[in-house]
Image (cartoon, rainbow, N blue to C red):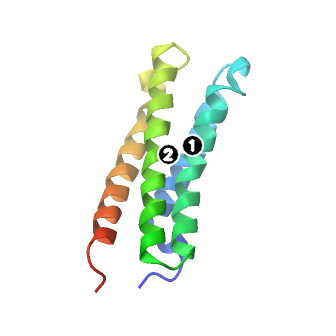
Amino acid sequence: MIKSYRELIVWQKSMTLAVEIYQLTRRLPTREQFGIASQLRRASVSIPANLAEGHARGSRGDFRRHVSVARGSLAEVETHLELTRRIGLITRKETATVESLAAEVGRMLSALLRRLKQPAP
């Protein structure tokens, strides 16, 4: 049994993703620091924050709901990354590591959500 959200591998990976997003957005033009950079940072931080909050609430339903919100935040991160590439602020090569990590977190969130939708043991 997991006693702390910090034990969740998906929380750990999503924290790494948030750190990577912060490092990536530092390379964006200063004119974007209050625009797309801010949106990317907020969405990426929302992923582990929702996992932590949902787990801490102590109810399976609350945890499931917060995992779902975390998945939504991940989709937001992926969308903002795509936009930064499409408007020429960053290259695919620069986002490759972050996108790979985001895909891994996405798979983990989906697996966790499936597990939480099953009846409790």
Residue 69 rendering spot, x and y as whole percentages: 48, 53
Mark 2 vs 1, N-terminal side: 1
> Taking 4 as reference, is 35 above or below it?
above
Per the image, label 1 sits on a secondary structure element best described as helix
Q: Are marks 2 and 1 in contact (CB under 8 Å)?
A: yes
Residue 11 rendering spot, x and y as whole percentages: 49, 62
Q: Which residue is mark 1?
A: 43
Query: Who's the residue at 58% across and 33% down the image?
Result: 24
Quarter containing the C terminus: bottom left
Quarter containing the N terminus: bottom left
| Residue 8 seen by the camera | no
State the CA–CA distance, disc 2 to disc 1: 5 Å
Residue 114 rendering spot, x and y as whole percentages: 28, 64
Name the residue nearer the viewer: 60 or 115: 60
Q: Which residue is mark 2?
A: 73
Per the image, label 2 sits on a secondary structure element best described as helix
Query: Who's the residue at 51% across and 13% down the image?
Result: 87
Query: Who's the residue at 55% across and 59% down the image?
Result: 50
The kind of residue on which mark 1 rests is: Ala
